[in-house]
Image (cartoon, grey):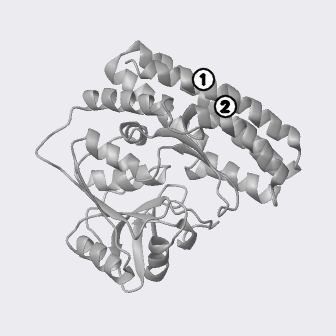
Amino acid sequence: MKIENLKPYSGEHCETTATGTLLRQLDIDLSEPMLFGLGEGLGFIFWNMKTMDFPFIGGRVKPDLLTENIAKNLNLELTVKETASTPKAWDNVKELIDKGQVVGLKLDCFYLEYFSKPFHFAGHYAALYGYDNENAFLVDTKQQGGQVQTSLKSLALARAEKGPMSSKNLYYTLHTTNKSFDLKTAIVTAIRNNATEYINPPITNIGYKGILKTSTEIIKWFKTSKNIEHEFGTSAMLMEKAGTGGALFRNLYRDFLKESYELLKLEKLKTAHEAFVEIAALWTSVSGLFDKVSQTKDIKYIQQASDTLKIISEKEKKTMELLSTI
């Protein structure tokens, strides 16, 4: 069983790709930067727990919140459900697919057979659009192959995995309501909300304060690392390509601001876009320095990354303060 007339979304980030596929079924087709911006997606977190192999550097709001914000700003109905029962979890989504409804899934990508370099990350998303007796058919990011498949057994493991950022077989659907949306109004609301949230972090490892904290924490991390090559190499890949850390999300937000300026013609948006052109490039240099650390194990590259993060923190704070006033 495969849903006919599927319009798979082609994106670089997992949650916008999954949610974009669900939105296309509602005949809402927006660019990935626009979805990220409407989802109030820009954020930052430095997360280090004893249960984790190495610290996590995240460049967006927490999992699940992006789609929630998109639904809110576009006046859509979002239904999110969880269950601890693996058989029930499958029966529930199978029933929706049988009715022709594309379903968003939250997964640990370690178990997905189409990942060439599996790693545990339980905040991954994909859209389910079909199944047969052995496999599930999914829409994932461009990097992972777009329309892909994995065995039903591996999908069940990916949905039920426990650990940081995991949920109990979470799945979600989107539906239209009797309220339409005005894109220009939605953009302004989303930017203000995102900026206000960003510049008022509740704890010091979030937002611009988190970036500043990371500038010192990465030096401690380097000095206590058990496997510099693996830890910093993986972190660099995640930041730049896999959609968790700084560079990818700054690229998306930069392009969102450009698209928003073209629609609204507000000078503050133009100024902020120009700032994020610089900021995104600085994040790419940080992930590049992490890569050099993994190859050379030389502390000088960590010190350079630390200095760059201090600059980024100040630039992002200043730019988001400007955006909070549009």
Whole-Å distance between the Cαs marked 2 and 1? 10 Å
Q: Position of residue 82 (x, y in %)?
A: 34, 68
Looking at the image, residue 78 sits to the left or right of residue 13; the answer is left
Between disc 2 and disc 1, whose residue precedes? 2
Looking at the image, residue 179 sits to the left or right of residue 77; the answer is left
Question: In the current view of this chain or complex, which residue is farthest to the bottom?
Answer: 133
Q: Which residue is the site of mark 2?
A: 282
Location of residue 199 with respect to 169 vertically, above or below: above
Q: Which residue is the site of mark 1?
A: 315
Q: Position of residue 212 (x, y in %)?
A: 66, 33
Location of residue 108 with respect to 47 vertically, above or below: below
Three-letter code for the amino acid on which mark 2 is drawn: Leu
Three-letter code for the amino acid on which mark 1 is drawn: Lys
Q: To which quarter of the image does residue 283 belong?
A: top right
Give the secondary structure at mark 1: helix
**In the picture, which quadrant includes the C terminus?**
top left
Residues tagged 2 and 1 counted as in contact (Cβ below 8 A): yes
Location of residue 324 with respect to 41 vertically, above or below: above
Q: Is residue 273 visible?
A: no
Q: Position of residue 216 (x, y in %)?
A: 74, 38
Q: Is residue 324 visible?
A: yes
Out of 64 and 244, give the one closest to the viewer: 64
Q: Position of residue 297 (x, y in %)?
A: 87, 50
Location of residue 64 with respect to 313 vertically, above or below: below
Q: Which mark is residue 153?
A: none
